[in-house]
Image (cartoon, rainbow, N blue to C red):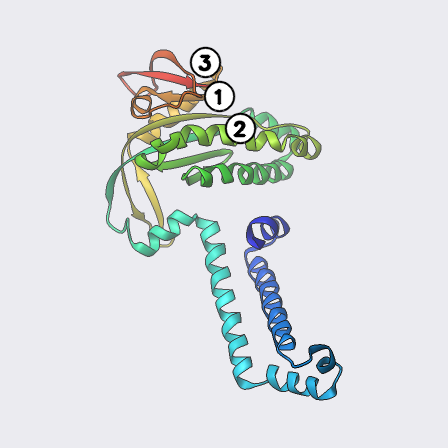
Amino acid sequence: MLEIFYFNRWFINRSFTQKILYKSFIYLVIILFFLIILFIGTADGMAAAVSRKAFWGYAWAFFTNYSMLSVTIYICSIILVTQFYTEVSDSIGHAALRNFFLGKYHRPVQEERIFMFLDMRSSTTIAESLGHVRYFEMLKEYFSDLSAPVIDHSGEIYQYAGDEMIISWRLKNSIENNNCIRCFFSMKEAIGRRATNYEDKFGLLPGFKAGLHCGMVTTGEIGVLKKEIIFTGDVLNTAARIQGLCNQFDVDILISGDLVKKIDFEPIFQIKSLGENILKGRGEKMELFTVR
C-alpha cells in the first residue's frame, strides 16, 4: 500500500539511490516502532510499568542486546535488497527482469506477439512551445500515466523512443479479454482524468495515436556492455507503418486485418474497415480497421 499509494508519488523526482535509502529508512522506522509497541504491550500492568525506571532499564537491555541488534541488521539488509530489486525492476521492466533471471531468452526463441506503437500527436509543436526541459517533464508525467493501463492489461513496455511508446503482448495475453484494445482506451481514460493537471501545469492536454499488428518475432538477449531482450521481425516495422497512417485516416487507432481476425471483439467495440492499403516498404496490400 505504501509503495502504490504514497512512495510512487512522494519520491517520483528522486534519484535511484535516494529512493532506496529514503524508503528503506521509512520501512525500518515502521518495523522498529511496532517492535517497541509489542515490547511495551507485553509488560505486566503496562501503564504502571512504563512509569517505572526499571522498565526502561529492561527496554534498554532488550534493544541493545546482541540478538536484537543482529535481527535489526538482518531486517535492514533485507529491506535494502528488496528495495534495490524493486528499483531495478522499475528501471528495466518487471517482465524483462524476470526473463533475465529465468534465462528465458538466453537462446533466441520464436513466438507470436502483438505490438502497439503509440505516438504523441503534434509532439514537435508541443516541444517547441514548452521548451526542452518542460517538455521532458511533461513526457515523464505522460508516460507515468500511461503505464498503469499497460500493467492492468498484461502488457509489457518494450521501448521508449522519444515521445513514442512500444508495447508488446504475447498473443494469448493480448486477445484474452481484448486486452490490447482495452489497454488503448484505458490509456485514453487515464490521460483524460488528468486533464486539469496537464492544462494547469503545461497549458495543453497531450493526445496520441496507435497502430497495432501481430506476427512472429525472434526474441533473445543481445549485447555485451549493456544487455537487452529485443524482438526482431517484420511485425514491428509493419506496426510502425500502420501507426503512421492514423493522420491520413483521421483516427486515433488503426489495427491490421491480421490482428482483427484473431480477436473476438466484445459487443462494446465497434469495428470499421478502412479498406486495403499499401504500406510503405511492403508490396502487398493490407486491410486496416479502426475501433470505437
Q: Name the residue under label 1.
A: 252
Whether the residues at callouts 2 and 1 have beta carbons within 8 Å, the answer is yes
Disc 1 packing (10 Å; few <14; some 14–19; many ≥20)? many
Above or below residue 72? Residue 142 is: above
Residue 62's x, y, as percent? 60, 84
Name which residue lies at 46% across and 39% down: 152
What residue is rendered at 58% in x and 68% in y? 31
Q: Is residue 288 above or below residue 65?
A: above
Of the pair 44 and 27, the residue shown nearer to us: 44
Q: Quadrant of residue 267?
A: top left
Give the alpha-carbon distance from disc 2 to disc 1, as whole Å.
10 Å
Taking the image as shown, residue 199 lies to the left or right of residue 125, namely right
Q: Which residue type does callout 2 highlight?
A: Lys
Query: Could you tell me the amino acid type at mark 3?
Result: Phe
Whichever of labels 2 and 1 marks the residue nearer the N terminus, that label is 2
- Which is more toward the observer, 62 or 20? 62
- Disc 3 on helix, strand or loop? helix
Estimate the x, y position of residue 138 in percent, counting from the top left. Answer: 61, 37
**Labelled disc at residue 188:** 2
The CA distance from mark 1 to mark 3 is 9 Å
Which x, y percent locates residue 20?
55, 60
Q: Nearer the viewer, mark 3 or mark 2?
A: 2
Mark 3: give few (<14), some (14-19) or many (20+) Cα within 10 Å.
few
Q: Is residue 281 left or right of residue 24?
A: left
Dot 2: element: helix
Label placed on residue 249: 3
